[in-house]
Amino acid sequence: MKVLYFAWLRTHIGHGEDRIDLPAGINDVRGLVEHLRAKGPGYARALTDLATVRVAVNHEYVGFDHELKPGDEVAFFPPVTGG
Amino acid sequence: MIRVQREDFDPGAEIAALTAGRHDIGGVVSFVGLVRDRVEGGRVGAMTLEHYPGMTEKQLAEIDAEANRRWPLAASLIVHRYGRLEPGDRIVLVVTASPHRDAAFDACRFLIDWLKTKAPFWKLEETAAGGQWVEARDSDDRAARQWESAAGKPDAAE
């Protein structure tokens, strides 16, 4: 699946996009977060405080208990500051 | 109607185009957001607006559709820019038009309040200390929350 990072999450992680084959046993956003945190210190730092992280799956806001399917586009980003 | 673009826009030309040939419109309300050169804690040289292509358009279209469900609008338009912007530059335009002014006023306020908390844009400010990501403001969340009830008017409780 495609995983995207924006704003300071991208800055911490060092790039804006990953292609990830969802490991067996991971079936929701929270599981994906745990998987990403183990990928390195930048990921762990970006995903430390989930109160400051928003998630979208296929361009819609979801919660951390949202179920993931292969082929989903998942995005992690801070609360938005447009307008 | 929504548009996401790097280029500047001309508010007058946008309003003229939106209302051209329409004789059912009695009032037009517009909001134009500009880049300020000062924020809490200092001055800002310029900023770069990052967004999430695809999701931005989808969220703006949903917000626009919601306004049209809540109020009897004759026309509506959101234009939001991205990329590097300097103080004084226009960032966002919201235009609402309706047969009577109340709907246009309320819907315009709703659109800007909601897009500030839902449309995936992030501001990176250029300060003397380097690039700083702008933090979301509680006051923006409160402004959006007052529109959460399905009714057209803000909740009286807020």
Image (tube, helix red, strand yellow):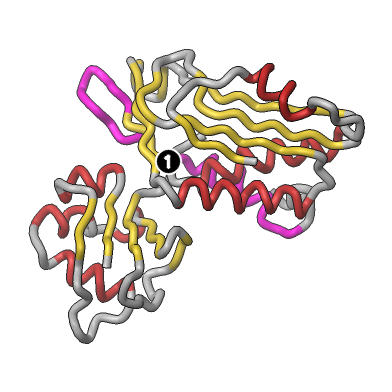
Residue that appears at 55% across and 29% down:
B92
- Seen from the viewer's position, the closer of residues B15 and B47 is B15
Count neighbours of disc 1 (C-alpha within 10 A) and say few if under 14, some if 14 to 19, many if 20 or more: many
Locate residue B153, reporting x and y percent. Answer: 79, 48
Locate residue A17, reporting x and y percent. Answer: 23, 53
Q: Quadrant of residue B23?
A: top right
- Seen from the viewer's position, the closer of residues B145 and B70 is B70
Q: Which residue is mark 1?
A: B121
Check disc 1 and give the amino acid type: Phe
Locate residue B34, reporting x and y percent. Answer: 52, 21
Position of residue B94 in the picture relative to residue B141 (left or right): right
Please determine whether, in this image, residue B9 is positioned above or below residue B108: above
Residue that appears at 24% across and 28% down:
B131
- The residue at the far left in this view is A40
Residue that appears at 35% across and 16% down:
B43
> Disc 1 is attached to a residue of which chain?
B
Residue B137 on the magenta segment: yes
Residue A58 on the magenta segment: no
Q: Secondary structure at mark 1?
A: strand
- Seen from the viewer's position, the closer of residues A52 and A31 is A31
- Res B135 seen here: no
- The residue at the far front in this view is B21
- Seen from the viewer's position, the closer of residues B63 and B114 is B63
Please determine whether, in this image, residue B45 is positioned above or below residue B97: above
The magenta stretch spans which residues?
A: B125-150
Locate residue A16, reporting x and y percent. Answer: 23, 49
